Amino acid sequence: MSSNTTSRVAAGVAVGLIVGSVPAMADTDGESAQLAPLVVTPTRMTQTVDESLSSVSVIDRDEIDRQQPRQVSDLLQGRAGTSLASNGPFGKDTSLFMRGTESDHTLLLVDGVRMGSATTGGASWQYLPPSEIERIEVVRGPRSSIYGADAIGGVVQVFTREGQEGPPRVNAFAGSGSFNTYEYGAGVAGGTGDTLYSLSAGHFHTDGINVRDEAGDDDEDGYTNMTVSGQLSHRLTREAEVFGNFLYAEGESDFDPDNPTASAYNEFTQAALQAGSRLSVTDLWQMEVAISQSRDQEDNLYDDQAGPDDSTFDTRRDMAKWHNEFDLGRDLDLAVGADWREDHVDSTTDFDEDSRYNIGTYQVLTAWLGSHQLQGSLRYDDDEEFGDQTTGQLAWGWQLTEAVQTRASYGTAFNAPTFNELYFPDFGNPELEPETSESFEIGVRQAGRYSYWDLAVFQTDIDDLIDSSENINIDEARVRGAELEAGAHWQEWQVSGAFTYLDHENRDTGNELQRRPNESARVDIDRQLGDFSVGATALARGRSYDDQANDTRLSGYGLLNLRTSYAITPEWTLRGTLENALDKDFETADGYNQPGRAVYVSLHFNQH
């Protein structure tokens, strides 16, 4: 499929969804959306999506169950402002590009715990298990003024399965499919008036596909992931609560090294652990304190030493936070807090430095003035390596009608160089400066009884962007774009979709930034037919370039995934998917294969 064709398909799919479906189903009495999702990621304070002055999307457990993903990338690919590239499927290195920014410019949180590798800077999206996720909040646009470094492009927060008041409820699943794939898992959740708990575990295995034809061996490159997660909270008194949560995953993922006959695999560990307490100091002052730790470890092992020496990269982040929320009256809300983190590197590679700390303080003030909302945030970071950084954000919203809100914002952000960029032998550059950015956004959102849509245009200018090939700062990169997200539900139908347009360049060379498509689109359609449901996801992605010189072109493509489910009883459900139904050949990284047509079937039990 040519890039022009893909662009027209992407635009047509998205515009057809918005123009064709949403107005036809739009609410006519002006009532706002019912049960608008609650989010905490945009400001660290609870608010509805409709109240937020950010571009934010929520993927809940019902949607995850409907779409039956094998990987978290299946849920995120093609969403508004979001694209992903991977070195093959099933546990292979995956990069997420939010609004055209770099892969290490999006912060990943798991239940509030900062994840990612201190050596590479990026998060290991490929190891996140969909079976353990309750919901995902995706915030597009800079958030350094609240979370510090890494949030130039946005924040993705994953929430693991939660307990709810009531007797213990069990869930379990088992499934299998193409590429000798099988998975299974189980969990239990419940609670009393004072205590809530959840515990679940899962196992995923696939033989996979041969990821590279011209490197490594000709065998399939498999993947195994074993995961366990849990949450526990207990109310000590009416004013005080203690809580804890964890996510732990470990496994193996095969990969093809550059040696044309070698085989290799990595053993990985991903973990997030947190404990803390919440206290109602007064009716107008809520406080939370917590300590946490995350780990990102990979051991790269080569068969018969046909590749480089075996290596270990084990990074650990120790963290603490103090968060306060104040109701100041007169429609004023204030959040004030401080957080501390220290990164540690334990590796077979000899880094000149193997630890550094960062201390940050932040404040977020929100004011309602009739139909207008104003919000300002300011953060000061003291980094052991780079000294101090101050970032801020201003946002304004205007409620034009009960269902329509406009917004505008300006924000600054920064990203500190990684340990690899600074200290990796024969590559690191200790003279690197932090990347800094300025972003502008204008948006409008409509939420009705049966439909919603959100349109935003934005621009981000990044100074001192780090060139990953030469490991130097370049003067400036610029990303301009527009994104449209919409959805509607009517009786047995559910429809949602997104379209993103990007204009991005390295302003030193005039070249496009690598692996970012200029256009992408996604449409999800589902219909309930009694005990049956059927659905489809259509994805379209324009052409991109695999390298910074723009010499290697990645063709655009379109994919169609089909799904169905049957409720055998209220508790038992049989599900099936046909992925890449048209058996398209495509790549998101040059030389790395992606799966052809594949079939998966699973059986699920959910106790009500």
Image (tube, grey):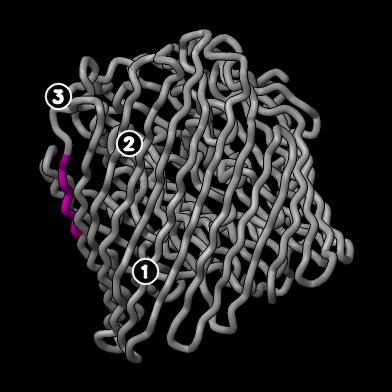
Residue 446 is at least partly visible in this image: no
The magenta region covers: 355-361
Residue 520 is at least partly visible in this image: yes
Quadrant of res 113: bottom left
Q: Mark 1 points at which residue?
A: 244
Q: Mark 2 points at which residue?
A: 121
Is residue 578 left or right of 96 when viewed as pictured? right
Q: What amino acid type is highlighted by mark number 2?
A: Gly
Disc 1/disc 2 C-alpha distance (Å)? 26 Å
Q: Earlier in the sequence, mark 2 or mark 3?
A: 2
Pointer 1 with pointer 2, Cβ within 8 A: no
Quadrant of res 571: bottom right
Look at 19% across and 56% down and name the residue there: 340
Pointer 2 with pointer 3, Cβ within 8 A: no
Q: What amino acid type is highlighted by mark number 3?
A: Glu
Residue 325 place in picture, x, y as percent: 29, 74
Q: Name the residue under label 3.
A: 431
User: Please, which residue is most extreme toward the bottom here?
Assistant: 238
Q: What amino acid type is highlighted by mark number 1?
A: Gly
Q: What element carries label 3?
A: loop
Mark 2 residue crowding within 10 angstroms, few (<14) / some (14–19) / many (20+): many
Residue 297 place in picture, x, y as percent: 35, 39
Disc 3/disc 1 C-alpha distance (Å)? 40 Å
